[in-house]
Image (cartoon, grey):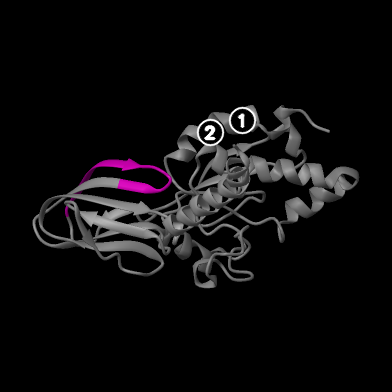
Amino acid sequence: MVSTSFYEPSPELRERLPSLRKGRLYTCPFETSPAYLSGRIAHASEHEVWTFSLLLETLSPSFNVPHGVPTALSADLTMLVPTERILGPGQGSCGNLAPLLPLLREAAVTTVLSLDPLEHADLAPLYVLNPVRTWPVAVHAYALREPLPWIALQGGGRIRDVRRSANRLELVTEADAATTLVVRDAWAPGWTARVDDAAVQLQRGRHRQLAVPAGTRRVSMTYEPPRFRAALLAGALALAAVAFLLLGPTRRASP
């Protein structure tokens, strides 16, 4: 049994949340971390609780969600993500940064969290968190140098008035010539796009992108789960059928 405070981030992490929300986070997996393996021995009798605390303090999925911190290329907890969009076995390990960092840069990752100290020219140390709950392991934070922007115009131009929610993105583009808008979020069935209220085709790939004409344009992208409206209709018909079965006989029996 635990209190609700058990699920809250430490004061050290809470102080860093505003800056983490401004970028995109990648957390090095624990499986091959020397710090984690040695710390687990120190907490042998309660390693499940201790590991839970580490997951929370590193915002490992899905602990990033309640705090609004975007992540990329993290573990797929749903087992529904296509394999081409996640890191294969060994690819996500921070023990070999040379092949990993280009993938993180392409995904617009700005911050890397690790239980082990990392050394690479493309990683700049930011801070070290030492929450009591993760002793004897600390959380090391690094800034990834020159990450690609989360949203950009490939052919040049300017983006302004960006508004973002879980299932919708709205913005204004300004360009002297036709260009391509790239949003480094995963493409999935259910995403649609409009330019100046006209439906346009999203290009399918790892990230969402679409062609944008020259000039000032209002662009929106909206996500709706596939067959969502059909499911709502089916649910409404099922409720109507249940109501008929429950109320119909009563009406027929009334004088």
Q: Magenta segment: does it hold 164?
A: yes
> Residue 231: x and y, percent?
49, 57
Q: Amino acid at mark 2?
A: Arg
Instruction: Name the secondary structure under disc 1.
Output: helix
Q: Residue at x 52, y 34 (%)?
A: 17
Residue 135 image position (x, y, % from top left): 76, 38
Query: In the rendered view, does 82 fall on the left or right side of 35?
Result: left
Where is the C terminus found, in terms of image quarters? top right
Residue 8 sits in quarter: top right
Q: Nearer the viewer, residue 84 or 227?
A: 227
Residue projecting furthest to the right: 45
In this view of the protein, can residue 74 be seen by the observer?
yes
Which circle marks residue 16 in the picture?
A: 2
Numbered label attached to residue 12: 1
Q: Nearer the viewer, residue 3 or 192?
A: 192
Q: Is residue 38 above or below residue 255?
A: below
How many circles with numbers are drawn on the protein?
Answer: 2
- Report the magenta stretch's main SS: strand
What is the C-alpha distance between the residues marked 1 and 2?
7 Å
Q: Position of residue 98 (x, y in %)?
A: 52, 66
Task: Give the residues drawn in magenta, as a range.
Answer: 157-169
106 shown above or below 133: below
Frontmost residue, 96 versus 158: 158
Q: Which image quarter is the N terminus in?
A: top right
Q: Are marks 1 and 2 in contact (CB under 8 Å)?
A: yes
